[in-house]
Image (cartoon, rainbow, N blue to C red):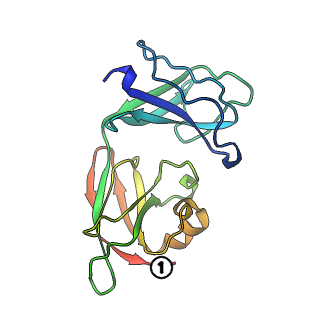
Amino acid sequence: MTPERVRLFPMSVDLESYSSGSMPGPPREDWTFEMKGVTGRRLIRGGDLRGTWRIKSVQLEGTDVTDTPIDFTGGDVNGIEVLLTQRKTDLSGAVTNDRGETVTDAMVIAFADDPEKWGQASRFIESVPLDQNGQFRLQSLPDGRYVVVAIDDLEPGEERDPEVLSQLRSKGSRVTLRDGETRKVDVKVVTY
């Protein structure tokens, strides 16, 4: 992989200041990077343009800040190191109703079993609509223990709402994912 295929960006954790600064370009040839005009609390996110590389970790002066916002309020922040990986988890399955019939009109959410990992910009929450065969596939979740649930009446954005996730937590299937692991879990559609 070459640096020009990589994009890193500062994702706001404050919904009121979702975008500030310009979208950074690729890293330089020596793999160093700079993000200008960044303010507020941000998570570093990104990967390569083809989607084959993703962020494994972000370090700031030796401390893991992959899922901890970096505060850019005071100005420049130096010493951020980003580790990319090609290893992905792969979680797939099918969704049925109480009668065992295939469901095709629902959303599948996989979210961390640990409520401390919930939030608007969390890497530990991923959702996807079902395909025409009632199948789903999620490939961006980090290692961890997850709840997987299918919902047929979810409003956009509710999949990241801690109150909604709290209600769904007891209704889903549990699965543990390890780096590079492929898992399959079939779930029943639920309402909340």
* Residue that sits furthest to the top in the current view: 30
Q: Residue at x 33, y 85 (%)?
A: 98
Picture layout, residue 60 above or below residue 152? above
Q: Is residue 21 left or right of residue 109?
A: right
Foreground residue among 23 and 121: 23
Instruction: Look at the picture and state if 115 lies above or below 60.
Output: below
Q: Position of residue 111 (x, y in %)?
A: 46, 59
Is residue 5 found left or right of 66 in the rendered image?
Answer: left
Q: Nearer the viewer, residue 1 or 70?
A: 1
Asked which quadrant contains residue 184, the reply is bottom left
Residue wearing tag 1: 191
Q: Residue at x 34, y 49 (%)?
A: 139
Q: How many marks?
A: 1
Q: Badge 1 local density, few (<14 within 10 Å), some, or many (20+)? A: few
Residue at 62% x, 23% y: name it: 36
**Residue at point 69% right, 32% down?**
39
**Percent position (x, y) of residue 86?**
31, 35
Element class at badge 1: loop
Residue 191: x %, y % from top left:
47, 79
Within the image, what quadrant is residue 29 found in?
top left
Q: Residue furthest right?
A: 74
Q: Position of residue 49 (x, y in %)?
A: 37, 33
